[in-house]
Image (spheres, coloured by chain):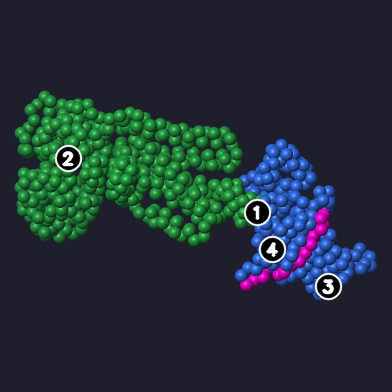
Amino acid sequence: MSEQLALLPGFLTAHLQLALPALLVATGISIPLGVLVTRRQGLEPGVVGTASLIQTIPSLALLAIMVPALAALGAVTESVFGFKLRGIGYAPAFVALTLYGILPILRNTVTGIEGVDPALVEAARGVGMTSHQQLRRVEFPLAMPVIVAGLRTSAVWVVGIATLSTPVGATSLGNFIFSGLQTRNFDAVLVGCVAAAVLALTLDQLIRALESGIRKRRPTRVRLAGGALVALLLFTGASFVAERAGGGVRPIEIGSKAFTEQYVLSEMLAQQITARTGLPTSAVQSLGSTVAFDALRTGDLDLYVDYSGTIWATIMERSDLPPERGRVLDEVTRFLRDEHGITVVGALGFENTYALGMRADQARELGIASIGDLARHAGGLEIGGDYEFFQRTEWEALENAYALPFRRQRTMDPALMYQAVAEGEVDVISAYSTDGRIAAYDLLLLEDDREVIPPYDAIVLASQELAEEHPEVLDALRPLIGAIDADAMQRMNLAVDRDGASAGAMARRFLGSLETEPPPRSESP
Amino acid sequence: MIQLENLSKQYGDLTAVDGLDLNVARGELLVLLGGSGCGKTTTLKMINRLVEPSAGTVRIDGEDTSALAGPLLRRRVGYAFQQIGLFPHLDVAENVAVTPRLLGWQEDRVRERVDALLRLVELEPQTFRGRWPAQLSGGQQQRVGLARAFAAEPEVVLLDEPFGSLDPITRDRLQRWFQAVRRELGLTAVFVTHDMVEALLLGDRIAVLDAGRLLQVGTPDELLLHPAHEKVAELMATPRRQAAAIDALLGRPASA
C-alpha cells in the first residue's frame, strides 16, 4: 500500500492537469454556446444534438478515436505551423475530456436561461436594460444555479472519465487502476478509485459552495471555496510550468501495453537506459496494442516491446501459415524498417505466444494435450478470449486448421480471464505463454500440433527519431538482447502476479543478476 | 405630454390595437379601461416600446419615440408591471436603484434617491433596504415596484394594474397614497385597469377601449352622465348599481 501511496502525488497531479483544464475549456465553450443558442432561433436542436451525440460515444472509444484523429491533425499542424501535436498522451485525452465535459454545462445553460420567468425578462427590458444588460444582470444570475449544477455534473464526469485516459498514454489516477487490475494489485486499484472519487466530490462541493456563497452573499464561504479552487488551479498551472522548466532534456518515452510482462520489460528498458546513458526516461503505461505501435510510428513513443507474431498478424496482416521463428523475425525486421522506419533493436530471447490454455486437471480428465485433441471436445466447452483475440488472424487460422466449434465464445478482460478459467467459468482461454498466472492457477498450455500460431518473439522496437538522435540508447540495450529466457520471464511475471512484487523491483533484480552472471545462451541474432 | 396618433398593433391577422388617437396632458392621469383582450396593456407597452407599434406614432414631449433607442426611452419612462417583476436576486435597494444605475448616476445620489423613495412608499429604509423580494408581502412588493418605476425621476409613468393582486383594504390605502405621491411629484401617468371603481377614483380622464378601438374618452363625470356608447353605459351601470345598493343599505335615497 505504501508503495502505491508514494505514486499518488504524481498521478494525482497528472489527473488534475487533465481534468481541470478540460473542465475550464469545456465551460468556456459551453456557456457562450448555450447563450448563443438561446439568442438565435433554430440553433438549439443542432448544437445540443451534436453535444448529445458526442456523449453517446462510449468514453473509452472517444478517447481511442482521438489518437488517430490527433495524429492526422498533428501531421497538418507540423506542415503548416511547424509544431507537431502528439497523437498519444495528454492531447487526445484532453480533447476527449473537453468534448465530454461540454454537454451538461451546455444543456443546463440553455435550460437555465430559457427557464427564467418571462415576466422578469420583460421587467429587465422595461427598466431600460439593453439586451446585453438583460443577459448579464438578470438572465445569467437567475440561471446560475442551474448552470452551476451542470458544471458540477461535468466536473464529476470529467474527473471520473479521466481515469480512462491511461490506455491512450496520458498519465492519470487510471494508471493505478489499469496496472492494478492487470497485476492483481488491488491496493493499487483501491488507491486509484478512492483518489478519483475524493477528487470528484471535492470539486463538486467546492463549486457548489462557491455558487451558493455568491448567490446568498456569504463572503466567507466565497473566499474559502473560491480560494480552494484558485489554489487547485494555481497548483495545476505551476505543475505544468515546473515540468517545462525541469524538462530541458526530452525524456526517452518508453511504452508498455496493459499486462504484467510489459510493465516489467518497460521498467527494465528504463532502468538500463538510465544506468548506461544517464538520459531521463518517462513511462507511458497500459497502452492499447495498436495505440503503442501507432505512437512509435509517429515518434510519440521512443521504445516499447512488441511480439514478432503480433506484427506479423496485425500490422503486416499476414494470415498465411508463418514460417519458422527466425524467418518471421527477419521478415518482420525488414518490414518495419522499410515500411515504417522502425528499428528492431533485437529479440529479448523468449517467446510470449498466444496459446490455448485450460485447467490441468480438466485436460487430464478429458485426455487433452494438444489443440487437435481439444477439437474433439470443443462442442461441450466454452472459450474465453481477450478483447482482440477473436478478431485476430491467429484465431481465424486456428479455426481453419482445427475446426473448433466451441459451445460459446466470451470476450473478457485479460486480467479476469485466468481467474475465470481457474474457477470453471470458462473451459479454455487465449493465454499468453509467459504469463505467471499459468503456473499460479495450474493451467496447461495445449500444443499447437499443426503450428498455425506464429512465433511471438519479444522484440524491442525503437522509433526512427530515437535511432537517429540517440544511437547510444540502442547500444545500451544490447546486453538485454537474447538475455531473457521464457522461464526467467515467467518467474518475474509470477512474482508480480502472485506474490505482489513490483514490476520495478523485478526488473532491478534481473538487471542486477545480469551484471554478475553470464547471460543465458542467446537464441536470437 | 403624450400623444398617440393612429396607433395600431397587428399580431398576424389579429388586430390588438386599431388606429388609436389619444392625448395625455402634463400632470394628468389617464386611465385605459376595458375588459381583457381590449388592447389596453398593448397600448401601454407601445408607449415605451416594450411592444413596437405596427403603425402610428407616439410622441412624448413632442418627440417621436421611434427616433430613440428603446433602452434609452425606457429609462426615461417609469413602468410598474402587473406581475410586479422585482428581480429576486437583487435586494430591495438594488431593485429600486436599477434604472438610476443604468443611467450612470453617482452612488451617493443613488443611495439618497433609494432612501427617499423607500420613505415615500412607507418602507423604512433601515429595515427594508437589504431585504430580498421574497421576504416581502404582496403589498410591500407592489410598493417597491412603484418605487422602482419612480426611481429615475421620470416625467411619465406607465402603470399596468399595479394594485391588481391586493386585498381591498391594502388596495384602497395604496390607491390613496399613490394619488398623493403622484400629485406631489407632478407625474404624468397612464394607468391600465379593468376595475371600474379604480378607474373612476384615480383617473383625471378615462379612455374606454373595446376590441382595440377607443369607445370614448372623458372625465369620470362625463362617462357616468353622458356615455357615448352603449357598452360604456353598460360599464358605468355597474358602479352606479353598486353605489345605489350601498346607499340603500345605509338607508339613503340613491343619488344620481
For residue B243, the mark is: none
The chain letter corresponding to blue is B
**Crowding near the residue tagged with mark 4, few <14, some 14–19, many ≥20 C-alpha atoms within 10 Å:** many
Badge 2 and badge 1 both on one subunit: no
Q: Nearer the viewer, mark 1 or mark 3?
A: 1
As drawn, is B55 to the left or to the right of A447? right
Q: Which residues are magenta?
A: B13-35
For residue A461, the mark is: 2
As drawn, is B36 to the left or to the right of A337? right
Residue located beneath label 3 in the image:
B228
Residue located beneath label 1 in the image:
B69
- Judging from the image, mark 2 belongs to the subunit labelled A
As drawn, is A479 to the left or to the right of A78? left
Badge 4 and badge 2 both on one subunit: no
Q: Position of residue A131 (x, y in %)?
A: 59, 52
Residue type, mark 1 in image: Ala
Q: Earlier in the sequence, mark 4 or mark 1?
A: 4
- Judging from the image, mark 1 belongs to the subunit labelled B
Residue located beneath label 4 in the image:
B42
**Crowding near the residue tagged with mark 2, few <14, some 14–19, many ≥20 C-alpha atoms within 10 Å:** many
- Inspect the magenta stretch and tell me whether residue B23 lies in it: yes
Q: Earlier in the sequence, mark 1 or mark 3?
A: 1
Structural distance between the alpha carbons of marks 4 and 2: 79 Å
Q: Chain A's colour?
A: green
Query: Which residue: 45% across, 40% down?
Result: A203
Question: Regarding mark 4 in the picture, which secondary structure is present there?
Answer: helix
Front residue of this view, candidates A331 and B231: A331
Residue type, mark 2 in image: Leu
Q: Position of residue A365 (x, y in %)?
A: 10, 51
